[in-house]
Image (spheres, rainbow, N blue to C red):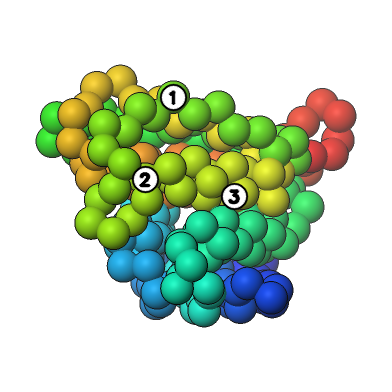
Amino acid sequence: MLNRQAKFERKTSETDILVEVFLDGNGKYQVATGVGFFDHMLCLFAKHGALDLTVKAAGDTHIDDHHTVEDVGITLGQSIKQALGDKQGIVRYGHALVPMDESLILVALDMSGRGHLELDLPLPAAKVGNFDTELVEEFFRALALNCGMTLHVRMLSGRNTHHIIEGAFKALGRALRQAVSKDQRLTGIPSTKGVL
């Protein structure tokens, strides 16, 4: 198996982001974005996705966390896309149904090369601690568009905002793990078009 890893950096006047990803890892992570709750979610994503993840971010969090969260999504998406290479032999599709106490979250995705987000994740609270929960959508959109992933995230039940978001990040990791895994029965690109 090829070494499916990538390192990507993004520097703007608002943020300085470094992401390293190894798709065939075992869930090791080093995450420091300056946004505590977001760090926790990224660690869960890596652990449940069985990918090794390093994220280092410095951003204008003295204003708010928006630029940091969105730019990490952009950079992570670009890193996953680069690590996948030409996508030969991958399963391509992934899904996960994850319970987190009272919440139940469905994530389905397609490594189609077409970035798209469908989000049905009503969050009861505007904040979890100091974290603005509207940034969850910003992260998922940035990730999907920059990875070239069609991503559906749907809450089937839930009342606690922390549980809902945590379930979504865990489900994302598990669905991605399935989609990028190699299918030994397949050769070539998993598309009749011959390209993804």
6 lies above or below 157: below
Q: Which amino acid does label 2 sit on?
A: Thr
What is the crowding at mark 1: few (fewer than 14 residues within 10 Å), some, or many (at least 20)?
Answer: some
Q: Are marks 1 and 3 in contact (CB under 8 Å)?
A: no
Distance CA(mark 3)–CA(mark 2)? 16 Å
Q: Can residue 111 be seen in this view?
A: no
Image coordinates of residue 154 in percent, x first then y, are 41, 26
Residue 150: name its quadrant: top right
- Mark 1 → mark 3, Cα distance in angstroms: 16 Å
Q: Judging from the image, what secondary structure is the residue with disc 1 in?
A: strand
Estimate the x, y position of residue 179 in percent, counting from the top left: 55, 41
Label at residue 120:
1
Badge 3 crowding class, 10 Å Cα cut-off, few under 14, some 14 to 19, many 20 or more, is many
Q: Mark 3 points at which residue?
A: 143
The residue tagged 2 is 133
Identify the mark nearer the N-term, 1 or 3.
1
- Badge nearest the viewer, 3 or 2: 2
Quadrant of the rendering where the C terminus is positioned: top right
Residue 183 falls left or right of residue 193: left
* Residue 50 screen position, x and y as percent: 40, 59
